[in-house]
Image (tube, rainbow, N blue to C red):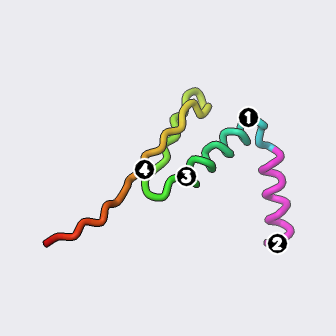
Amino acid sequence: MTEEQVEHKMELLSKISNQEIEVLEKVLQVVRQVKFGYVQITIQDAQVVQIDKMEKYRLNRKQG
């Protein structure tokens, strides 16, 4: 990673509020829990108000 890229990331991080960091941490935590499925984020008035996860379980069925 170049020095310019590091500076750019540091600038972006400095603009994130503590509340936004908490939301991002929660989203990351939920994403890491899902092996197969999806994570849906509901936003209202530019604020995350809900995080849903849907997991799919794949069953190994032998046909015959």
The residue under label 1 is which amino acid type?
Gln
Residue 64 placement (x, y as % from top left): 13, 72
- The quarter of the rendered structure image containing the N terminus is bottom right
Q: CA distance from mark 1 to mark 2?
A: 29 Å
The residue under label 3 is which amino acid type?
Gln
Q: CA distance from mark 4 to mark 3?
A: 9 Å
Q: Mark 3 or 2, which is nearer the eye? A: 3
Residue 29 placement (x, y as % from top left): 62, 48
The residue positioned 31% from the left and 61% from the top of the image is: 59
The residue positioned 52% from the left and 40% from the top of the image is: 41
Upstream in the sequence, badge 3 or badge 2? 2
Residue under pointer 1: 19
Q: Is residue 60 left or right of residue 43?
A: left
Question: Over which residues does the magenta segment extend?
Answer: 1-14
**Given contact means CB atoms under 8 Å apart, are the residues at marks 4 and 3 in contact?**
no
Residue under pointer 3: 33
Q: Quadrant of residue 21?
A: top right
